[in-house]
Amino acid sequence: MRPLTIFESHFRAAEVLIKVYRLLDPEGGRGVSPETLSQLRKLMDYEPTEPLIVLLNDLFVGIVRERAQVHPAFFQPANLSLLLRQAVVSACTAMDVFFPALLEAHLPGVVEVRQRNFLPSGGDVRNLFRDFSLRLDELPALIEQGEAAGRWNVLTRRVLDYCRERTLSNVNGISAVMLMLGTDDPWRGIGTRVGANERSLRDQIANIAKRRNDIVHRGDRALGRTDEDPQHIDYAWTTSHVNTVQSVVLACDALAEDSVRQLQADAGGV
């Protein structure tokens, strides 16, 4: 399965959560007149005494019956904000699975071409691999390979396993992945592909990654402020940042394809 397909299968949850929030639209709902409510009761054959919650806005009309055991306060903005928070988490989870899959798809081809030069030595890549090591019991599998290609395959597998255990869904992780796949200036390339300012893209990825951590680990409370109320989350903010995740991933997928293709073309022309 392509890395982009894997991403889209996880990212779809974020899109659905945002759409559901928009349908329920706690800020844009309007009241229902007694006459309209009476007509709805007759149309649906509901008892005149049954309490109903009617949701009505420009996009959606819904009726919640008493048997659902849902209090009207459930549809207030503070509660429906949970949908936006989960959209943030889902978008970041989609990045969590995409970037290891991107390495899995393309790193073997990079190693085949670059071999001992496959791993850039500086910056974000160096930081990513500062804890990397080969255990003594892993050496036989490497040494016993009869051909150089086999040894490189074993080492590539070890690198991929190591990366799969690291968080790559942040600014530095994305940069490291793209550098490993042959993109010399990752965020500049991403900005060019997306048609947006690279600093703005980095800031939005940093913001949504931090917000995901706040949501998952502290109930959306900032670090050191766990005794306070959850941070406010806005529909516009969520939509903007989730869309940026999608744009950055699409750009990285295209950049990786182009970079590996160019590496292999250059190697074939030597």
Image (spheres, rainbow, N blue to C red):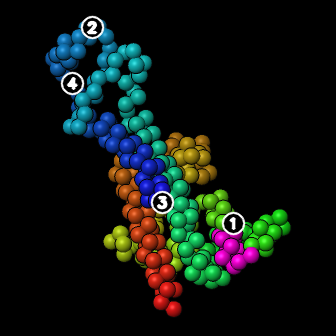
Q: Secondary structure at mark 1?
A: helix
Q: Secondary structure at mark 4?
A: loop
How crowded pointer 3 is (Cα within 10 Å; few <14, some 14-19, many 20+) is rated as: some
Above or below, comparing residue 153 to residue 268 in the picture = above
Instruction: Looking at the picture, tell me which residue is in the foreground, 138 or 192.
Output: 138
Residue 32, numbered label: 4
Residue 47, numbered label: 2
Distance from the alpha carbon under mark 1 to that under mark 3:
20 Å
How crowded pointer 1 is (Cα within 10 Å; few <14, some 14-19, many 20+) is rated as: some
Which residue is label 1 attached to?
A: 158
How crowded pointer 4 is (Cα within 10 Å; few <14, some 14-19, many 20+) is rated as: few
Snapshot quadrant of residue 29: top left
* Amino acid at circle 2: Glu
Residue 199 location, x and y as percent? 43, 72
Sequence-earlier tag: 1 or 4: 4
Distance from the alpha carbon under mark 3 to that under mark 4:
47 Å
Which residue is label 3 attached to?
A: 3
Residue 147 is a magenta residue? yes
Distance from the alpha carbon under mark 4 to that under mark 2:
18 Å
* Amino acid at circle 4: Val
**For discs 2 and 3, the disc positioned in front in the rendered view:** 3
**For discs 3 and 4, the disc positioned in front in the rendered view:** 3
* Amino acid at circle 1: Arg
Snapshot quadrant of residue 126: bottom right
- Count the marks: 4
Distance from the alpha carbon under mark 1 to that under mark 4:
62 Å
Residue 159 is a magenta residue? no
Q: Residue furthest bottom?
A: 270
Q: Which residues are magenta?
A: 146-156
